[in-house]
Image (tube, grey):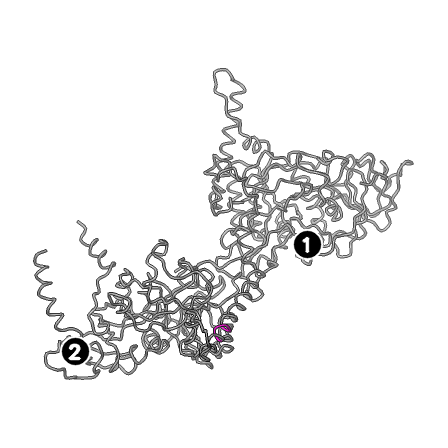
Amino acid sequence: MNAATPTVIAIHNARVVPVSGPALARGTVIVRNGLIEAVGADIRVPADAWVIEGDGLTVYPGMIDALSTFGIPDAAPVTTGGGGRGGGGGEQAVTQPIAPPPATTLPARGPEDRPSTTSWLKAADLVKLTDRRLDAARAEGFTTAVTFPPRGIFAGQGAVVDLAGETSGDMVVADSAGQLVTFATAGGFGGGFPNSLMGVMAYIRQVYLDAEHYRDAKQFYAAHPRGVQRPEYDRALEGVLASPRVLFPATRRIDVDRLLRFANELHLKAVLYGLPEGYRSADLLKKADATVLVSLRWPEKARDSDPDEMDNMRALEVRDRAPSTPAVLAKNGVKFALYSGGIDRRADLFRAVKKAIDAGLASEDAVRAMTLTPAEIYGVEDRLGSIEKGKIANLLVTKGDLFQDRTEVKYVFVDGVKFEPVEEPPATGRSGATEATPPTSEVPRGENQ
Amino acid sequence: MRSLAFAVLFICPLLAAQDDSFLIRGATVHPVASAEIQNGSVLVRDGKIAGVGRNLAAPKGTRIVEGKGLHVYPGMIDSGTQLGLAEIGSVRESVDTGEIGKFDPQLRAEVAINPSSEHIPVTRANGITAVITLPMAAGGDGGGRRGGGAGSIITGQAALVHLDGWTWEEMDVKKSAAMAMRFPSIISGGGRFGGGDLPPDIAARFSFTESKKNYETELRELKEFFEEARRYQKAKSANLKGFKTDLKFEAMLPVLEGKEPLVVMASRERAIHDAVQFADQQKVKVIIADPRELGKMGPELKARNISAILGPTLALPLHEDDPYDAPYALPGQFYKAGVKFAFGTFNNEFSRNLPYQAATAVAFGLPYEEALKAVTLNPAQIWGVSEKMGSIEEGKSADLMITDGDPLEAKTQVKQLYIKGKTVDLTNKHTRLYEKYLNRP
């Protein structure tokens, strides 16, 4: 924490990119008590303000990591769950290692046992200032994250959190951002139901049908308690009903198609995440007026792969074209946000965004996809995502344009508190490579006769 | 029922009298080793071929088999099976393909063969009269059966057996046709069904780094084992006092002396290359078994006169992006490279498909004559028994089939089968089931 930061700050004569409106070549931003008091070209600097001279600096809204586990200690980044058969050359869309069930519980027999479900968990209750990744996240330019409990089919409810605060509770901006669903199977090998993608889908469908019935039964009971048997309390369904939206993983185009139909059938407000094949799914997304979160962790060759093995064409194509997904979505008018996918070094993150820009995404669209759009997707655009009067003073001050190789993150303001980025940890060698990622691999299966 | 009993009573003495001497005449004879003979005859005496040609004279009283409109071929040889060692893959108790331990050269597959296996009559009915039975590691490149022996490198002695006999002794052709071995290889990536649905702890075992480490360890162990065997060989020939017989090393002596080949399971180019190098270093003879690709290994195999046992052609390509016909065309590639090869099915239930595996290769670039050789004469040469079998030539075992056409054609029927001149019953589980359901009321 930087306790010396005064409560009133003026960033004077800097380039200001409010995102909600046109950029100001020379503007001033006044921050008071954690909120943006004023922004504009001709703003008088208050007498009590700590002035930061903005020559050569650019002020952006603080970036929002639209799907993350920042703030939840020891959580691995969210991946899209089971890659399934033919998932393609060792990309990272592999099964998330889910925590083995406690030894005392028997393997689940069916949906009635609510397998791999912790829908009642709230990230807002789990976030801790002690998560060491917060420093790294701020150094990347993130001031906010939509953070989720990462494990299970119904993993739990996300929260919009600021990445600093006096107490852990300070961090929470919105405590109910949505339910995170992954397609994690019970792990096979006697792990119980569900053990296949088919089973996972059937389970999710059953839970939503149960939830609908549960809601009606509860409402009826609340209106007529006398003479009516009370419905059994089910925390799994409570968790599902408390979530204003649901996040589904979509790796391939077929997932996109399947999940859009699925959400439509169950009348769910769904957001798809992952989308390495988003570049060829835009038509489906447009038609369904869908909203998506695109992972910046572009597919790449598995780190520990056989140098003599050739990757198959499908994998190579996805690897080559995945970074064009944001450009294609932007062109087709699909609403999308970008998320880090667990990339925890600034250089790697910027390089990943730069890839999307090089593949045709306009820089402004990239900035929007990491600021105002995620705020809109999670319904907090009245508080976050742009530099406007009255919004939370989450700012990112850079030297140079965002996402360029030489861009420096000078300051980050979280709730009006200034941070200067710490030294980055030494390079891990490959972009987006974190220790928490499970190794990916393929093995030859038995030949069919 | 009664009439059947009568018939049996009458026929039996008749058969016994005729024994294993007869004359087939008027048939088209395909000796394989030489050009076909129209209206030809094959004379069989005491289980051996006594003559091939036109208008052969038979000693008086010789049983005559009229072959008009029919064809005579040598019996086929499947160069890779586990016949007699495994009955039902998924029933553990019936699977006896391998032992525990990395080096088991002292094991002899032959003594474990079950002569009453249901697979034997089924296989035979398509004209296959002899097979190589390989002791094999569990989950190996072959049938993928599990019968112990996971991680084995030298799995034991492969036997060449006739598909007829009450006991394995009666079936025996060559007890130790070769020493069976799986060459250590790096198993990682590239699987056609490579997906991500393995739990991470399992997947980690197949990571390249882990796999390579394992491969290097196995290679070192293999070299050490051969060094020890050579030390044993020296000690034995020096007649050292207190010399102790060790069956493992004893079994390796013929291999070290170059008398017995190593039949090496090596599916990928890299493993084939390794196996060839290993043979060079150790100065041993190798046969490459079940290769799935040839790559650039053609000239090396040819230069060293190394033969191959090609696995099933009716298989899926190794990689998703491979041409659909890669396995069909592989035998043609071996042929063009000038590498001698025979076919093996590396299977039990489908050993009977041996001729169709060869036929598929013909449709994709292999000359027909070569395909026929690869199931008859080539295997006999590769396994070192060409003086005994593999073609219709005087002095060879009378392993013959009489067919109504080309045996590589699926619609051809085997009318009569002889092993060592003895008529072999062609009924089997398939025909029994056929009869059963045909006669369903």
How would you classify the magenta stretch by its main secondary structure?
Answer: helix
Q: Position of residue A5 (x, y in %)?
A: 85, 39
- Whether A268 is drawn above or below A406: the answer is above
Residue B50 shown left or right of residue B371 in the figure: left
- Whether A384 is drawn above or below B123: the answer is above
Badge 2 element:
strand
| Kind of residue indicated by mark 1 | Ala
The residue at which mark 2 appears reads as: B23
- The chain letter under disc 2 is B
- The answer to whether marks 1 and 2 sit on the same chain is no
Q: Quadrant of the C terminus of chain A?
A: bottom left
- Whether A268 is drawn above or below B86: the answer is above
Q: Position of residue B20 (x, y in %)?
A: 18, 74
The residue at which mark 1 appears reads as: A352
Disc assigned to residue A276: none
State which quadrant residue B359 falls in: bottom left
| Kind of residue indicated by mark 2 | Leu
- Is B229 one of the magenta-colored residues? yes
Residue A92 shown left or right of residue A164 in the figure: left
Name the residue at the front extreme. B241
Residue A88 shown left or right of residue A293 in the figure: left
- Is A339 one of the magenta-colored residues? no
- Whether A358 is drawn above or below A121: the answer is below
Asked whether the residues under the numbered discs 1 and 2 touch, taking CB atoms below 8 Å apart as contact, a structural biologist would say no
- Label 1 neighbourhood size at 10 Å, few (<14), some (14-19), many (20+)? many
State which quadrant residue B108 falls in: bottom left
The residue range painted magenta reads B226-230
**Spatial separation of the CA atoms under disc 1 and disc 2:** 82 Å
Q: Position of residue A207 (x, y in %)?
A: 50, 35
Q: Nearer the viewer, residue B301 or B118?
A: B118
Residue B73 shown left or right of residue A394 in the figure: left
